[in-house]
Image (cartoon, rainbow, N blue to C red):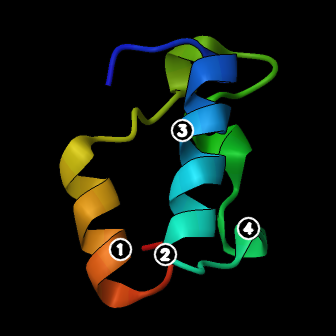
């Protein structure tokens, strides 16, 4: 997904609310690290779909 940190946080909040997922299961710093952006793993649409199916953040 090509979005900035704020957009991603808003989208993930909506998804977690819609599918009753625990926010604590997501380590947002993996996807948007504070120090070195080159270490970021970018979330994908497929990750969101699989997470919704599983009922928890994968």
Tell me if label 3 and label 1 are in contact, CB under 8 Å: no
User: Who comes first in sequence, dot 3 or dot 1?
Assistant: 3
**Location of residue 24 in the rendering, given as x and y in whole percent from the top left corner:** 78, 72
The residue sitting at 36% across, 72% down in the picture is 51
> Few, some or many C-alpha atoms within 10 Å of disc 2 (few <14, some 14-19, many ≥20)?
some
User: Which residue was labeled with disc 3?
Assistant: 11
User: Who comes first in sequence, dot 2 or dot 1?
Assistant: 2
User: Which residue was labeled with disc 1?
Assistant: 52
The residue sitting at 71% across, 28% down in the picture is 33
Tell me if label 2 and label 1 are in contact, CB under 8 Å: yes
**Location of residue 19 in the rendering, given as x and y in whole percent from the top left corner:** 49, 75
* Quadrant into which the C terminus falls: bottom left
The circle on residue 23 is 4
> Few, some or many C-alpha atoms within 10 Å of disc 1 (few <14, some 14-19, many ≥20)?
some
User: Who comes first in sequence, dot 1 or dot 4?
Assistant: 4
The circle on residue 17 is none
């Amino acid at each position: 997904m090509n979005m900035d940190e704020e957009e991603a946080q808003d989208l993930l909040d909506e998804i977690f609310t819609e599918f009753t997922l625990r926010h604590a299961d997501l380590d947002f710093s993996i996807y948007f690290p504070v120090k070195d952006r080159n270490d970021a793993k970018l979330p994908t649409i497929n990750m969101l779909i699989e997470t919704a199916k599983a009922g928890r953040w994968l």
